[in-house]
Image (cartoon, helix red, strand yellow):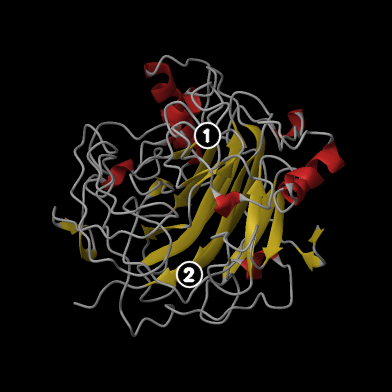
Amino acid sequence: MWIHGQPLETTRCVQRRADRDRVRAVAVALSLGVSGCTWSGVIGVVADSEAEGSEASSLDVLSGGGQLSGSTGEETDALSQDDASTNATSGASGGGSSADSQGTSGDAGTDPRPVDDLGDSSELSVFGGGDLECPYKTPSACDDTSDDFAAAIGLGCERGIQPSSVSLAGAPSSHGVHHGQLGGPSSPFTPKHGERFVLLSTGDVAHVAMSRDEIETATGCAADDALCPSTVHGPDYRYEILPSPINPSPVEGSDPCIKQPELVGTGDCSRTILEQWQAGAGELLAHDYTELRFTAEVPEAATHIKFSYAFLTAEYPARVDAGHNDLFIAWIESERWTGNFALDELANPIAVDVVRYDYRDAEHPDLCSDGMCVEPKLHGFGLEGHGATGWIERTAPILAGDEITLVFALFDLGDAAVDSVILLDGLRWDCALPG
């Protein structure tokens, strides 16, 4: 298979724990009243990536994120087990500005940094790396002359992540590489590292960079239609079972996987996927599924892996809270942790109904009204008139010598109409703070 003139290696799907996952997933599904659903599948192929590197945030897994503009020194209170979002103090205001989080709950396994219980029972450390001697902190960019997916997010670059396999799944038009700034001059969507980033879309990625008038000319979907852009890829990309190793079933109990390592590999340690999937008009189907995936061995001294993303959706404003809860998952499969680590600044999953929208270019009775809903940052490209987050950085803990798999998956919920988009950039290893 060739993409943009580059050979695309088919990844080896991670099958360890697969049989155990199926049995446990069915048991959990039955206990949740969704009998007949088997959660651990082997459908689909893996994905492809792009790179970042020079900008760093002090934020880590499942904590505050935002645009990588450096540390603000602000402190985020630990969130209660009962309510992650209402008790969060993000310190971020529009545009995905960054906010630091301070952990207080002690040691996270072998990670020497403090941890913070963010209400999702993960208790992962909330500090990003910071060792100035870390050889992986500033990987070289290698996407200046090519639209290769891996290079666009930093895979295979000098001092960067060296993958053993990289692949894509989904409709051919559902993923692409964008060069330079997306949108008009005030758009915040510029590459986080290098000159390019990757786009995943439940529709056609070509529409993302088009103006609304251009989309109308190309597709007939009116420029002023609140449900455009919208592309349906058909039943070939509709899944009842998400591709392995993704397992939507939450791990059992309430203890975090860091404290109860035997939970790792039995489901989603973040406990964030299944509830959002069930919010999709009552059906457990992933429509217009697309993904980017890679496998790599963790080098010596690396303790974390980082990436940046932004979520944009045409589901806002017309179909928020209407059963069209399009969902983005960043799944890590490792010996230390298995599950989704894509959350917004308030620890919300990246789903239409619950994500924090930094940019809203249309009124919504509950989220944006009183004439304050015009956002020039979204003008001039396909998401004009809709909603988006800013760039958010996330970090996950890893173990040196482990072979990890990362899956970045996006899909429609409720039906296959109306598009959502993920921008991906800045994949790199990171190291723990010294001491």
**Of the residues tagged 2 and 1, which is closer to the observer?**
2
- Find the distance from the CA under tag 2 to the CA under tag 1: 28 Å
Residue situated furthest bottom in the rendering: 133
Quarter of the image for residue 193 reads bottom right
Task: Looking at the picture, tell me which residue is in the foreground, 401 or 56.
Answer: 56
Relative to 303, say whether 243 is above or below: above
Task: Looking at the picture, tell me which residue is in the foreground, 150 or 7.
Answer: 150
Quarter of the image for residue 218 reads top right
Relative to 402, say whether 409 is above or below: above
Name the image quarter holding the C terminus: bottom left
Mark 1: amino acid: Ser
Q: Is residue 177 left or right of residue 343?
A: right
**Residue topped by disc 1:** 40
- Mark 1 neighbour density, 10 Å: few (under 14) some (14–19) many (20 or more): many
**Residue topped by disc 2:** 428
Residue 53 visible in the shown view: yes
Name the image quarter holding the N terminus: bottom right
Mark 2: amino acid: Arg
Q: Position of residue 22 (x, y in %)?
A: 49, 31
Q: Position of residue 140 (x, y in %)?
A: 55, 81
Q: Position of residue 208 (x, y in %)?
A: 70, 49
Relative to 388, say whether 163 is above or below: below
Q: Position of residue 89 (x, y in %)?
A: 24, 47
Task: Looking at the picture, tell me which residue is in the foreground, 145 or 149.
Answer: 145
* Numbered label attached to residue 321: none
Kind of element beneath mark 2: strand
Residue 14 visible in the shown view: no
Q: Residue at coordinates 57% horizontally, 61% vertically from top-left?
A: 186
- Mark 2 neighbour density, 10 Å: few (under 14) some (14–19) many (20 or more): many
